[in-house]
Amino acid sequence: MSATYPNTIAGSEYPTPFVPFDLLAGEAPLTTNRATVANGQNLAQFQVVAMNAAGELVAWNPAATATVTDGDGTPGGTLQIPVTASRAIGIMAQAVNAGSGALPGLYYTGGHFNHEALVWPGGTTTLAARRAAFAGTPITVSQLIRDSGFGG
C-alpha cells in the first residue's frame, strides 16, 4: 500500500479538498479499541495487527510459533505451536512508531474492510488468506463490489 490516507479519528480535520478512499467494503458496525503498541514496533495506518503475550499490539505474523520444552527445561522435540502474534485481532486506525518505547494506539476491532486498503505481511496475498486471518473476529475483509465483476 503506497497511498497516504487522512487521519480518520473522530474530531480530526480532513485535508482540503477531501479525497475519498475505499477503506470500507461493506456495511458492518465499525468499532475501535485502544491498546499499547509494543516497544520496537513501527505500525502503519491500516496495518493488520495482533497482540503479544503482554497484551500489546504488534504487527501480525501468521507464521509466529514457539518451541515447547519439557519439564526440565530441555527442548521437547520439534513441536511448534502457534503463539498469540499468529492471530490477527485488528487493524491500526493510525500509524504509531513505538521504536523508542511503547506508545498508545487506536485500532479497529470490527467492520467490513477493503482487503486491498490494508497493510498485510508478505505472503498474505490472496483474498481467501486475508479472510482467514480474521476468522472468528468481528472483522470482515472483501473485495470492493465495483472490482468484483458486478455492476457496470
Image (cartoon, rainbow, N blue to C red):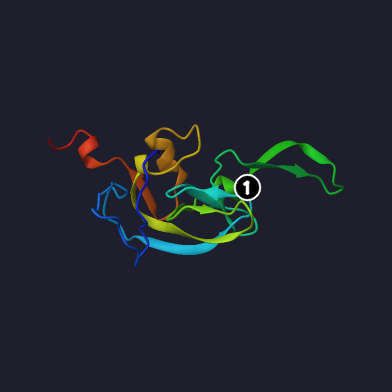
Residue drawn at (84%, 49%), measured in percent from left and top? 71
152 on left or right of 27? left
- Report the front residue among 99 and 124: 99
Which residue does the numbered mark 1 point to in the structure image? Answer: 83
Q: Position of residue 77 (x, y in %)?
A: 77, 36
Picture layout, residue 78 above or below residue 102: above
At which x and y percent is residue 57?
56, 55
Q: Classify mark 1: residues with Cα within 10 Å, few (<14), some (14-19) or many (20+).
A: some
Residue found at the far bottom of this picture? 11
- The quadrant in which residue 75 appears is top right
Q: Is residue 87 above or below residue 121?
A: below
Residue at the farthest front position? 16
**What amino acid does circle 1 point to?**
Val
Question: In percent of the image, x 64 and y 57: which residue is there?
Answer: 101
Numbered label tally = 1
The quarter of the picture where the C terminus appears is top left
Q: Is residue 129 left or right of residue 40?
A: left
Q: Position of residue 12 (x, y in %)?
A: 35, 64
Dividing the picture into quadrants, the one containing residue 68 is top right
- The residue lying at 34 percent from left, 53 percent from top is 6
Quadrant location of the N terminus in the rendered image: top left
> Circle 1 sits in a helix, a strand or a loop, which is it?
loop
Direction from residue 103 to residue 152 in the image, left or right: left
- Name the residue at the left extreme: 152
